[in-house]
Image (spheres, rainbow, N blue to C red):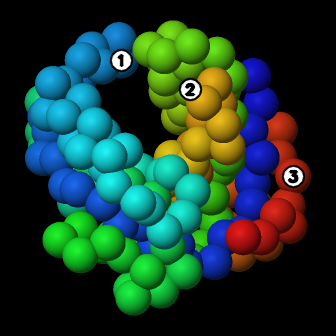
Amino acid sequence: MGFEIIERGETLVAGLPVRSPQRALGKLSDPRLDRAWTRVLHHEVGGPLASTYIDFAPDVESYYTQIVGYECATVDDATRGHVISRIPPGTYAKFSSRGMFPDVMLRLWAQVSEAETNGDIERTYTGDLEAYPHAYAVDLYIPIHVDESGAPSSAVGSSVMGEKR
């Protein structure tokens, strides 16, 4: 499965934070995430559903913070009591998956793992973004290193430049 290389502007995501252990692929169950999503979905939200992964180390068994919530145009669009994460502008590898949960997530992160293993991308770990265009689709934006020419560092995977948010 391919991915696209795109430039994204800054993205704000408001919602509820969940501090979780970094799990190996296939270990997706986290009751704290389920509770956070349930709470967010019971609120009026200011934009499309989204989730960010911030404040993490790349090693399995380390920790990261996931903000489960929704995109917002400004800080003022956030629901009272929700935190806001800022995903910086930059170059991202966009991976997409369609289907039923949890399989959709397993396929999505398997694509990322394959691209990393093959040397197609080198992650920067400055903040990942999951966007949900509809109930059966996930688009994952992974920030990546680029070389002086603007190409992904050591990338040989499929890519399309130029999409902006």
* Residue 165 found in image quarter: bottom right
Instruction: Identify the residue under disc 2.
Output: 108
Q: CA distance from mark 3 to mark 1?
A: 27 Å
Q: Secondary structure at mark 2?
A: helix
**Looking at the image, which is closer to me, 6 or 100?**
100
Of the residues shown, which amino acid type is indicated by label 1? Answer: Leu
The number of discs equals: 3
Q: With 77 as the anchor, is 114 left or right in this view?
A: right
**Residue 129 appears in the rendering:** yes
N-term mark: 3 or 1: 1
Q: Which residue is mark 3?
A: 160
Left or right position of 71 against 147: left
Q: Position of residue 7 (x, y in %)?
A: 72, 69
Residue drawn at (23%, 75%), measured in percent from left and top? Answer: 80
Labels 2, 3: front one = 2
Rendered image: mark on residue 25: 1
Residue 62: name its quadrant: top left
Question: From the viewer's perspective, is residue 97 above or below residue 145?
Answer: above
Judging depth in this view, the residue of 153 and 126 nearest the camera is: 126
Q: Earlier in the sequence, mark 2 or mark 3?
A: 2
Give the spatial CA distance, label 2 vs label 1. 10 Å
